[in-house]
Image: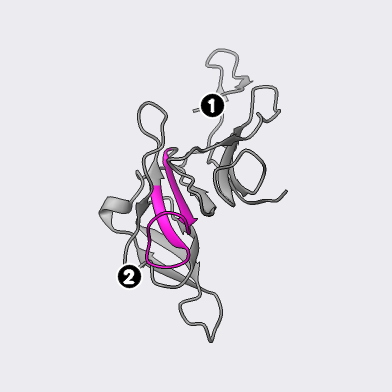
Amino acid sequence: FTETQPSLSADGKTLFFASDRPGGIGSVDLWVCHQQDDGKWTKPVNLGDTVNSSGSEMSPFFHPDGHTLYLASDGHIGLGAYDLFVCRLDSNGRWTKPENLGYPINTNKDEFGLIVNPSGNRAYFASNIDPASGRDIYYFDLPETLRPDQVSFMKGVVYDRETKRRLRADF
């Protein structure tokens, strides 16, 4: 079976990918697994029939905000073969129904491979809008309603106040 198009969470502990493995809902589904404290990965879990359709879902992109997932699908209602969608984890840990990003982002051609910058205001994707040139990369300013939460990145070292020894810490 095929596992493709991995998207790793910002903390490196959650992995989304597309696969045609058994136990799926459609031709190709989105799956997730988590890194455990011992460094081993959990068995992949299908994202379920809210996200996955009887068609194919691919190109997952999990935004660093930790709850916004962008994907391409030919099984959810759209404008073309593959359209771009967004869904979010709700407060109960369930995915919302994928929302089509709409026209002019989606066309009657294939759009896939969406990536959103950390600020959440600009997105990049691939499409075969112009069949003569094949697949090209495009960008656009993401409408407010489709944006993830804005995130900041910090890097630092934590020391014990008294001993001045470096501590292992996450923040």
Name the N-terminal-most of marks 2 and 1. 2
Eye-nearest disc, 2 or 1: 2
Coordinates of residue 54 in the picture (x, y in percent): 50, 49
Tell me if residue 3 is in the magenta stretch: no
Q: Tell whether 147 sits left or right of 116.
A: left
What is the crowding at mark 2: few (fewer than 14 residues within 10 Å), some, or many (at least 20)?
Answer: few
Where residue 104 is drawn, which disc sits there? 2
Location of residue 94 by image quarter: top left
Q: Is residue 166 above or below residue 148?
A: above
- Whether residue 14 is visible, yes or no, is no
Q: Nearer the viewer, residue 136 or 2?
A: 2
Residue corresponding to mark 1? 170
Q: Nearer the viewer, residue 152 or 96?
A: 96
What is the crowding at mark 1: few (fewer than 14 residues within 10 Å), some, or many (at least 20)?
Answer: few
Q: Residue at x 55, y 48 (%)?
A: 26
Q: Residue at x 70, y 27 (%)?
A: 39
Q: Which residues are magenta?
A: 67-86
- Which amino acid type is marked by label 2? Pro
- Whether residue 159 is visible, yes or no, is yes
